[in-house]
Amino acid sequence: MVVFAGQGDPRRSLSLLWRADAPPPTRGGPGPKPRLSVDAIVAAAVALADEEGMGALSMRAVGDRLGRTAMALYTYVPGKSELLDLMYDAVHAELPTAYPESDPADWRAALTAWAGEVLEFHVRHPWVLQVSQARPVLGPHEYAGLDTLVTLLRATGLEAGVLRRLVGTLFPFVRGSAQAVADARLAATATGSSDEEWWAARSAALLELVPDFAERFPAVSGLEAEGPVEPYPGEGTEGAEAVPYPEREARETFRVGLGVLLDGIEAARADRT
């Protein structure tokens, strides 16, 4: 399911994102119910999406978590579209905006750290991956994340036109890698069969039904036979096997792919000299 951000009223949505207007008055009253606020509603919605997925998100479900009716929420957030924008931007506040542990001149180490943080962020909040990048939310935390990446890329010394395209390359690459990790984690629960069961059943059937597979697809078959895959970092150590094979593969693909992308940046820098 793909969800497009920015479908609510433009001024009201941006006003809420940037907290540009004064919030509605907090209503006290008898009983132990907590007071509502935009932040409380957003936090409850994020917790719901983290636990149950985007499909469970509704104003009524969020209201239930807060012990209120959906109608009570509309005083603070006009609707689900605006709530989604607020959720998306709010969780982006988790991302670092600086990498002081890295040498400012070591752009490669800084970008590697950034990519790892962004990957883990999306794995923690897989519902964020369903929000299309075609239309940005335009919130402060989303902009802070973009500003951070541009700052790190400027250390490469490449011209602005190239940097814009690198932003458009790195973000989709990390999101795609995170999607692979998130899907690997979800597959067994969603389908009711383990990865081992799924592959064992289909591999046997494929060999039986397509005995000439290697001849028909020589490049794929040759790649599998040419040598062992580089081990996943930590593989062979205690606890490494707790990470399922598909997730280990997705993470190793991310590591190698990121290295190739950074090699490309290095080559582009060399071409300038």
Image (cartoon, rainbow, N blue to C red):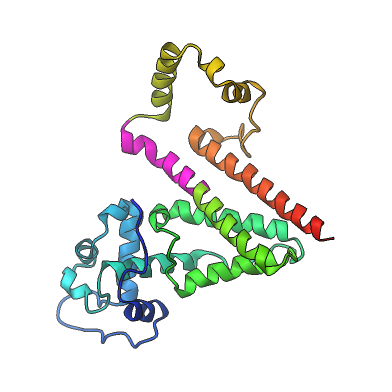
**Nearer-the-camera pick, 201 or 266:** 266
Residue at 38% over, 41% down: 186
- Residue 272 in magenta stretch: no
At 58% from the left and 35% from the top, the residue drawn is 238
Residue stretch rendered in magenta on the structure: 177-192
Q: Quadrant of residue 44?
A: bottom left
The outermost residue toward the right is 273
Q: Is residue 96 above or below residue 198?
A: below
How many numbered marks have been drawn onto this rendered protein structure?
Answer: 0
Side (left or right) of 156 relative to 219: right
Q: Position of residue 28 (x, y in %)?
A: 20, 84
Q: Residue at x 49, y 65 (%)?
A: 94
Does the image show residue 32? Answer: no
Residue 48: x and y in percent read: 30, 58
Q: Is residue 132 left or right of residue 234?
A: left
Residue 102 placement (x, y as % from top left)? 71, 62
101 w.r.t. 248: above or below: below
**Magenta region, main secondary structure:** helix
Percent coordinates x, y for residue 255 in the rendering: 62, 44
Quick one: 21 or 13, which is closer to the camera?
Answer: 13
| Residue 172 in view | yes
Q: Nearer the viewer, residue 111 or 166?
A: 166
Q: Name the quadrant of the C terminus.
A: bottom right
Q: Is 191 within the magenta?
A: yes
Q: Is residue 187 above or below residue 267?
A: above
Judge from the rendering whether residue 217 lies leftward or rightward of residue 3; answer left or right.
right
Residue plotted at (52% across, 47% down): 177
The image quarter containing residue 198 is: top left
